Every structure is written in C-alpha cells, then in structure tokens.
Amino acid sequence: MRCGDFKTSYAADMTIFESGTARVMLGLFFCLLFTLPLYVPGYLLDIVNRIGIAIIGAIGLNILTGFTGQISLGNAAFMAIGAFSCGYMGTKFGLPFYICIPMAGIITAFFGMFVGIPSLRIKGLYLAMATLAAHFIVEFLVVKWESVTGGVAGLSIPAPKIGSFSFDSDAKLFFLIFVLAIMSVLFAKNLFRTKVGKAFVAIRDQAISAEVMGVNLLKYKLFSFGISSFYVGVAGALIAYQAKIISPETFPVTVAIDYLGMIIIGGLGSILGSIYGAIFITLLPELLRMATSALAGSFPELVNKLAATKELVFGLLVIIFLIFEPSGMAARWHSIKNYWKLYPFSH
Amino acid sequence: MVQLSCSDIHLSFGGVRALSGVSFEVNQGEIFAIIGPNGAGKSSMLNCISGLYNPQVGKVMFEGQEVTRLPSYERTKRGMARSFQNIALFKGMSVIDNLMIGRHLHQHAGILTGGLYYGQARAEEIKHREYVEEIIEFLEIQSIRKAIVGTLAYGFQKRVELARALALEPKLLLLDEPMAGMNHEETEDMVRFILETNQVRGITIIMIEHDMGVVMDISNTVCVLDFGKKIAGGTPDEVQQDPHVIKAYLGEEDPEGP
Ligand SMILES: Nc1ncnc2c1ncn2[C@@H]1O[C@H](COP(=O)(O)OP(=O)(O)OP(=O)(O)O)[C@@H](O)[C@H]1O
Ligand SMILES: [Mg+2]
C-alpha cells in the first residue's frame, strides 16, 4: 500500500515524475502510443496527428497566457508564420524539414517578440486587442505577398524527407509529430522548474513584486513571447506538412480562439492541462460529427441543425469551465490522483 | 558608516504632495524606524528608496552611489530587498518557489539549459534550493514549504514575505509594516526574526511600524513623518520627548492656540 511520498534529497524532491508507479505508467503509455499506427486506421490517425500538433501549439499558448499572464489572440497568425516560412524554405530553397521546422520556430519567435513589445505598457484586454491586430496584419500579408505565400491559391508543401525516406503517410508523420510533441512537453516541464519559467509565473502573479525581486519585466515578457511563439511556429510548420497545402484560410482567427479554449478547458498554467485541452478540443467536432451521422438515419431533419452545434457546445463548455472549474481539467485530475494516492485512508 | 542617504525628497501625485523635502541618513547595520500617522508618506518614502516611485526632486544614495533614477531591479541587484504593506507574494506559487524567485539574480541558467535541465541549470537548482531551505529553517516555516502561498493564513504570508526578501541575500531590508494585523504571539515571533536578521546576518533594516512599543524597543534611530514632512528624528528617547511628535500623535491641540 502506498502511504505518501518521502524523499531523502532535494534532487529527488525536484524530479518531474513523482513516483516509481508514475514512471511505469508512463512507460506503458509510451508503448501504447508508439504502436498506435499499427492498429489505428488512417483516417483516425489523421485526427491523432492533429492532436499531437495541437498539444505543441497549446503548450506554446499556455506558456504565454497561462503561465505568464499575457493574453494573446495572435496564435493563428503566429501559426501561419511558422507554416508559411517552413513551406517557403522547403519549396524555394529545397531545405530539409529538420532545418525548416526549427527555422520556422525561430522566425515565429522573433515575430512574437516583436508583437510582444507593447506588453510592458498594456495588459489584459488591450493586449488581446493588439495581438488581434497583429493577426489581421499577418492575414493581409499572407494574401498579398504572393511571391512568398502563394496568395489565395496557397502553397503546396512536399512531404518531409530524410535521405530517401519520405514521411508521406499519416502513419509516418505520426512519429515525426509525436517525437516533437514529447520533446515540447519535456522542455516546458523543465523550463518551469528552473529560473526562467519561475520568473514567468512570478510576472503573472505579481508583476510589481517580480520586478522588485530583480526580474527584468520587459526582458522576461519578451522571452515568454519568444518561447511561446517558437512552439506555435513549430506547430504551424507541422500543420503545413500534414495539410500538404496551406492557404490564408488554413489559419482563420477561430483557430486562435480554439487554442484559447484548449488552455481554458484543459487548465491555465498547466502543461498537463494543455494536453487534455488539445485532445478534447480536437476531438469535439469529430465526436459531434459522429453523433450527427448516427442520428441522420432516424432524424434526418435534425442533421442540418446539429451541424452548427460545434460553436455552441464549444462556447458553453468554455463558460462552464470558467465558472465551475477555472483551473481546468488538470485540476480535476490532480484532486482525483491525490485521493487515490492515500486510498483508503484519505480524508 | 552611512549606507543610505535620502536628501530633499519631493514627491507629488498631481495635486497631492506625498513628500516635501524629506532628508535622512541610515547607518550600516542599524534598525531605522519610520513612523507617522496614516497618510504621512511613509510608504511613499519606502517606494522612493526601492525604486517604485520616482521623486520629482531629491537624491537617493546607496553605498556611495546615486540610485535615484534606477529601476527597482537594478537596486535589488545592488543589495536592496523589501516587503509590502499589502502582501505582494506570488499567490499561485509554492512557498519554495516564492523563495526561489529570491534566488533569481543569483542564478545564471538560460532558456536552453533550463529547458533541458542540464548541467548548470540542474546544479544551480539544487544549490539554491539548499540556500532557500536554510532560510525556511531560520524563519520556522518548514511545515508549509510546499503550500501554495495564496492558501496560507495572513500571519504566515507576512513571514513568507520576509523569507522571500531574505532569499535575495540583501544588504538593506525595507519592511513596510511587518507586524500589521498580527496577534500578540505572531508579533513577538516577527520581532525576534527581525532582530536576528539584523544581528546575526548583519542586514541593515528600515522599518515602517505603527506599534510604538516595538519601535521604541528595537530601533536605533527613529524618523517621524507627518503630512509629507520630517518633523523629528533621533534615538527613540529623543523622539519620544519631542514636542512636535507629541503634537502630531496627540492631535490638534495647538499649545500656542487660544
Ligand atoms: N500611487 C499613488 N497615487 C496617488 N496618491 C498616492 C499614491 N501613493 C500614495 N499617495 C498619497 O500619498 C500620501 C501618502 O501616502 P502613503 O501611502 O505614503 O502614506 P503612509 O504613511 O504609508 O500611510 P499608511 O500608514 O496609511 O500606510 C497619501 O495622501 C496618499 O493618498
Ligand atoms: Mg503605508
């Protein structure tokens, strides 16, 4: 029987995965995860891949909004920048994906830092407005700057290749996406147990005392914009490879709102929450579609009405979580886990 | 040796004159108390020293260098630390992490080493965790080290705020009403911690406090503010005898009045 956690050194107290059981569970989970392409059909794998990309993007947004407290509606624009810079480097210069993806991240990071400059002066809703403005500027540029983006016709992206091996199917892309997703999770986890990540949280909780404690606010806010946008840019690059063709319509402002929904429902300021949110919000329209087609036989007149339910359900869920569980699904999970840790003697 | 000197500080907010021409000097290693009625300008004075407010006129010198226009994180780098009248902790973080922010300036890991938890970043986290644990022991808050600060009782929060300031390893500590709102026992503990901070760690302390008993007991020098002006200064005994102080504290009975 487990009866609590006892540690004998600070190093042990500071590990990411708290117990041996957690490590074993995690090992099993990885075995299951990386054999998914063996038994999951292609069309479902496409959804799984989109979940993997959403995890990277949601962690990125959570770093900025959930951990540093800077609201951003520029997420879709940052994603577009990642996707188009990746696509441009791949098609125009023939660069391989293992250069294009990190470069897309870096380019997006610089753009994100530029957009973040006003954050020293403006906060909350005003910052949301400024980032929204950035979104529309990028959208405009994507349409007009045809020589780079292909304009409204879009840009078609060749499959990523390493040597003669080509990631040309969902099953192959799966590995690329999930290796990057796992790296993203680990990097973020580590970031928040060291200096830079803690400074982000301090800025969120009490900006003035963070400054008095020696945190350079502008520098660290820009770091946060940079790291966050790097993640989002990488997610954008992966979307480009997965979608194979990208156009201005691939990144509408509703994508930014979906991502905000992910981190609100999953849990602001929680890495695990970003994962839950990414899974949930990606699955939501699929589940609704399945429900609709199941009902189509018996109630054909309902189908048209149900088609519009995605936005409604999404909106309601966000409101419900904001009111009843502001710390998101991650907090729910945490309390359930703590209960079982001491079972049957918890009180 | 003079560690901090403020000369002719003037500060106003629009029409409100919070400070008009305040000057004083604080010696290395002493406990310096600032007292005065509500709204006298005590917190404003502390904010001018720590860099949250910029006085329109006047000069703040710290360890021989002018710091009047420096941002507050620069002053922290040079050895100042402070607590706030209305607790300003990082409410969503644990006690340990609040104190680890105090080690921010002593740590050097960047984004990459931190994100990989590799080399310097890892060694540094463990080393500074040890320092933080030493302060946790000093202030007797072991039992709450993992608690999220926002969930703690008021008295504990005040103590954690002192701990966080000490984690900076400051040379000068500014405390804005460290005992306000505490019961008798908590006040006694706090007095003990402040004295030990001063005597064992050799940290100079500037403290705003309303509890006259405490002020007269532990401070070396007292500065009295009223309506933004310094009306008296000196040892606790001198200040207690001062007619201006008696007048300010006992109200408006003007001795030369009708
Ligand atoms: N940020 C500010 N904006 C406008 N006025 C301010 C500001 N800070 C202080 N003041 C004004 O300056 C004067 C001095 O305030 P201060 O907070 O320094 O007083 P205090 O001596 O600390 O009082 P207390 O004992 O109530 O804490 C008050 O009239 C206050 O209203
Ligand atoms: Mg005050």
Image (spheres, coloured by chain):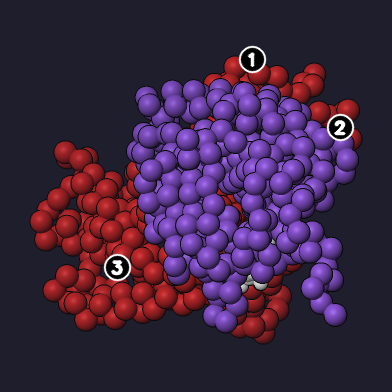
Chain colours: A red, B purple
Q: Is residue B143 above or below residue A273?
A: above
In primary-sequence order, the first of circles 3 and 2 is 3
Q: Residue furthest left?
A: A93
Q: Is residue B253 above or below residue B46?
A: below
Asked whether the viewer can see residue A280, the reply is no
Q: Nearer the viewer, mark 3 or mark 2?
A: 2
Residue sitting at x 77%, y 49%: B240
Q: Quadrant of the rendered structure where residue A302 is?
A: bottom right
Q: Quadrant of the C terminus of chain A?
A: top right
* Mark 3, residue position: A246
In primary-sequence order, the first of circles 3 and 1 is 1
In the rendering, which numbered label is found on residue A146?
none
Q: Quadrant of the N terminus of chain A?
A: top right
Q: Secondary structure at mark 2?
A: loop
In the rendering, which numbered label is found on residue A346?
2
In the rendering, which numbered label is found on residue A8?
1
Residue A142 placement (x, y as % from top left): 26, 75
Disc 2 residue type (three-letter): Ser
Which subunit holds the residue at mark 3?
A: A
Disc 3 residue type (three-letter): Ile
Query: Is label 2's Cβ within 8 Å of ligand 2?
Result: no
**Could you say which is closer to the camera, residue B72 or residue A3?**
B72
Q: Nearer the viewer, mark 3 or mark 1?
A: 1
